[in-house]
């Protein structure tokens, strides 16, 4: 009996030592080394590409935001049936594309709507978004770009197409008392080309663009 137990204990001991060594190497040393390398070589990216203004964190280059304001009734915020304030697009800001991540751009609930093209809810949402965007920007509903109507796959995309940014220029210029040429120049400065010159499409980071807009107009 003793002769059979000893080899088994030796095997258990070896397995336990291997477990401890691998836990320290792969669970502690490796993550610390990779974190240190990331902080040295890619500090901003490793920290989430956070954007700071006036000593405060105001967002991330990687996550979109909703630029809205509360709807007021007799000077007081309008509330919905669930007791939440009703909001509308803030006309002085460039608007982002829709988001299906939680209540909007929630990194803890990143997702698409997962609704098919024939889904009645999606069709109704697109119709409503088209009418809202057309009314806000004073354009024909047929000219509203697709990214103003459909959420991205992640629900976090901070970018819009140059076409959607161009649609909003006249409104921004009017609301900010700026010339159309100045706003268009700002959009051009924040238009990013295709990744590596051939991947994806040209895009405009709405978070960065609106921060630059605020800096321009104080």
Image (cartoon, grey):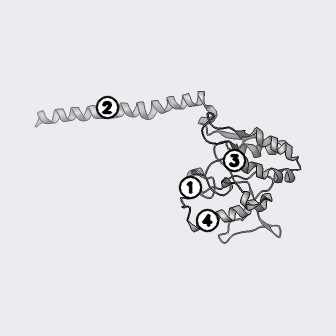
Compared with residue 16, is residue 135 higher up or lower down, i.e. above or below?
A: below
Q: Earlier in the sequence, mark 1 or mark 2?
A: 2
**SS state under label 1:** loop
Q: Nearer the viewer, mark 1 or mark 2?
A: 1
Task: Give the distance between the C-alpha atoms of the residues marked 4 and 3, in whole angstroms.
Answer: 21 Å
Residue found at x 62% / y 58%: 103
Q: Residue furthest bottom?
A: 81
Q: Earlier in the sequence, mark 2 or mark 4?
A: 2
Quadrant assignment, res 10: top left
Q: Which residue is mark 3?
A: 161
Q: Nearer the viewer, mark 2 or mark 4?
A: 4
Label 4 crowd (10 A; few <14 / some 14-19 / many >=20): some
**SS state under label 3:** loop
Q: Nearer the viewer, mark 3 or mark 1?
A: 3
In this rendering, would 209 be left or right of 45?
right
Q: Earlier in the sequence, mark 4 or mark 1?
A: 1
Q: Nearer the viewer, mark 4 or mark 1?
A: 4
Task: Give the distance between the C-alpha atoms of the residues marked 3 and 1, in whole angstroms.
Answer: 18 Å
Q: Which residue is mark 4?
A: 123
In this rendering, would 82 be left or right of 181?
left
Q: Nearer the viewer, mark 3 or mark 2?
A: 3
Q: Which residue is mark 2?
A: 17
Q: Earlier in the sequence, mark 3 or mark 2?
A: 2
128 and 75: which is toward the camera: 128
Quadrant of the rendering where the C terminus is positioned: top right
Q: Earlier in the sequence, mark 4 or mark 3?
A: 4
Task: Give the distance between the C-alpha atoms of the residues marked 3 and 2, in whole angstroms.
Answer: 56 Å
Task: Give the distance between the C-alpha atoms of the residues marked 1 and 2, in whole angstroms.
Answer: 45 Å
Residue found at x 67% / y 42%: 202
Q: In the drawing, what numbered circle is on residue 112?
A: 1
């Amino acid at each position: 009996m003793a002769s059979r137990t000893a080899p088994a204990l030796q095997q258990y001991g070896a397995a336990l030592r291997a477990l401890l060594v691998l836990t320290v190497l792969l669970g502690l040393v490796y993550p610390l080394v990779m974190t240190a390398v990331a902080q040295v070589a890619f500090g901003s990216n490793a920290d989430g590409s956070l954007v700071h203004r006036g000593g405060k964190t105001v967002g991330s280059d990687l996550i979109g935001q909703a630029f809205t304001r509360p709807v007021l009734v007799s000077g007081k915020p309008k509330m919905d049936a669930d007791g939440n304030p009703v909001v509308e697009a803030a006309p002085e800001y460039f608007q982002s594309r829709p988001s299906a991540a939680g209540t909007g751009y929630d990194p803890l609930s990143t997702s698409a709507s997962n609704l098919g093209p024939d889904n009645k809810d999606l069709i109704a949402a697109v119709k409503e978004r088209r009418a809202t965007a057309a009314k806000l920007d004073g354009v024909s509903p047929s000219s509203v770009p697709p990214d103003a109507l459909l959420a991205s796959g992640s629900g976090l995309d901070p970018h819009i197409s140059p076409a959607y940014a161009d649609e909003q220029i006249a409104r921004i210029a009017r609301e900010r008392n700026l010339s159309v040429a100045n706003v268009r120049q700002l959009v051009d400065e924040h238009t990013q080309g295709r990744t590596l010159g051939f991947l994806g499409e040209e895009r405009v980071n709405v978070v960065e663009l609106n921060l630059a807009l605020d800096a321009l107009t104080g």
